[in-house]
Image: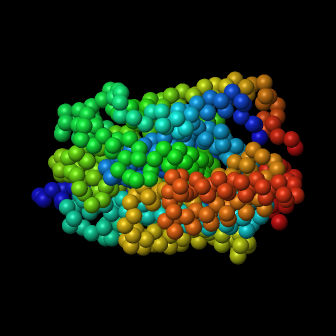
Amino acid sequence: MTKPTTAALLLACIPFLAVCFSVPLWDRIDPMVLGLPFNLFWLMCWIPLTSACLWGAYRLHASRRPENTPGHGEGEPE
Amino acid sequence: MKPSVVAIAIIFGIILLGAVAGLFAGVRRKMNLEQWTVAGRGFGLIFVWLLMAGEIYTTFAFLGASGWAYSRGGPVLYALGYLTLAYVVSFFILPEIWEAGRRFTLHTEADFFLQRYGNKYLAALVAVVGVAFIVPYLQLQLTGLGIIVEVASFQAISRPVAMTIAFLIVAGFVLSGGIRSVAWVSVLKDSLMLIAAFSIGIGIPYHYFGGIGPMFKALAQTKAAHLTMPGSTANLGHAWYISSVLLSALGFYMWPHAFGSVFTARSGDTLRRNAVIMPLYGITLPLLLFVGYTAILVIPGLKSGDLSLLTLVRQTFPAWFLGVIGGAGALTAMVPAAILILTAATLFAKNFVRLLFRPAMKDDEVAKLAKVMVVVITGIALYFAVRSSTTLVALLLLAYAGIAQFFPGVVLGLFWKRVTMTGVFAGLVTGVGITAYLLLSKHDPFFGLNAGFVALCANFAVTVAASVLTPIQVSGFEERVEQVAAT
């Protein structure tokens, strides 16, 4: 089984910090942005930003594959 | 014509359209167990996306989330948080689960446990716990359907009658087409859902306040506390938010139906790319929250928040539009319900009855028993839905608390060689036990934390400790243990 790379895991940590653990920092009404309370605005921003982080992780994964997989695709000890 | 007749006629028209699409999808293929449950493992990016989106945006998002925005306020943001983060988790674990599924022809989550840990009692326990916690989720969908028909008919059709009719239809298309028909109905359901979310999420605040911004400004002036946590509740603060988001994000793909949908994918890479785009679908959820927030200002004092979205739609728009929204809502209940029923029935037949009592059963006999179970499980959920009056979100939180307890067994099973069957068994029993105790004794939240999360932590600790204390066990995902699992 392919272990995820550290870089991909670090990318994955970013949305967790932003959306989950930092809640006391952004759970406020002001400043209202685009007419939205700040907490709702913040979470909505992180929908596309999370996609972006995962896209980065996917690029990392895809770039790693070519030198890892030729011949024996599973990469698992028999 | 009376507005209630127009609305109800349109709702049933949409339901029938969905049922026909579902029946059509199943007609051309011979349904064996492999086709029925995982569609021959042939779904590409689009179909996997449709199937997964189809099972995620349920009545919970449609009526429940707007209902909590109405009745609880700020804490409802947990739904937005966990729906975003669930895909981060899925990016890493789903391709590995898929890989195991392909190598060992797995159909269900219990199959996964059986293969990895080689113990049929553990697998049967997973099946039973899975079915047990699917029932409240199914009950959530049924209740949602009942609410839709009740409101749209201006209280002329009672909830139990509505729920019974709708679920006969769902059971019908599950029986005929299996998982493939579900993916097809998802196309219809998701298009309608998107149209509905955008038109009411933007239209309703505009109608009453001239826009989303002015609506929030009015709300911030009159009920500022409602917009942040703990909102209109006493104990759903930041600790509850963090623990609920974590529990739900980790538990998300532990749902036996979500876990099973992984096996329909054509490749692990399909699942990885799917995880990248899935969060974007979450943009409909805030739109539904806008409706709930508008409802506090326009129609305060409803006896249940779950009624707020539809009541406001009924008051704002003509009857035919109420019918369209109601029809979209009905499909968002029926599609996930179909998947839930299908999964629960297969789990019970394959991983409980055959595994423990009838090892000689052939695959078609399992499929046949599963079809009987479709009717039985639907009946049980219908019974609970008629009897109980819990809010939709509360039902979902309860179900998640139980389902998330599979997480240590799945993730440690994939990534940690030292985990043992005894460890996972002990952890799962601990986790489910604590969940049941805390929920039944009304200790949720427990010291400000989500009770399911407390149970999950205990589960993790027990799994790791008991694994380290028991002798090393070779993973069933190593080729050579295949014979052990087969005996």
Please tell me which residue lies in front, A41 or B407: A41
Front-most of residues B417 and B170: B417
Q: How is the image coloured?
A: rainbow
Image position, residue A53 (x, y; %): 57, 28
The answer to which image quadrant residue A64 occupies is top right
In the image, B372: left or right of B285? right
> Which image quadrant is residue A6 in?
top right
**Does B415 sit left or right of B148 as displayed?**
right
**Residue ID at (41%, 47%):** B230
Image quarter in which the N terminus of chain B is found: bottom left
Task: Please give left or right for residue A35 compared with residue B343 in the image.
Answer: left
User: How many numbered marks appear?
Assistant: 0
Residue B9 % position (x, y)? 23, 58
Q: Residue furthest left?
A: B1
User: Does B293 appear above or below B7?
Assistant: above
Identity of the residue drawn at 66% across and 72% down: B353
The quadrant where residue B345 appears: bottom right
Specify the farthest residue to the bottom: B357
Residue at 67% from the left image edge and 32% from the top image edge: A9
Is B413 located above or below residue B440 in the figure? above
Placement of B128 over or under B249, stated as above or below: below
Residue B123 in the image: state x and y as whole percent: 70, 63
Quarter of the image with the C terminus of chain B is: bottom right
Residue B17: % across, % down:
34, 53
Residue B190 visible in this rendered orientation of the protein = no
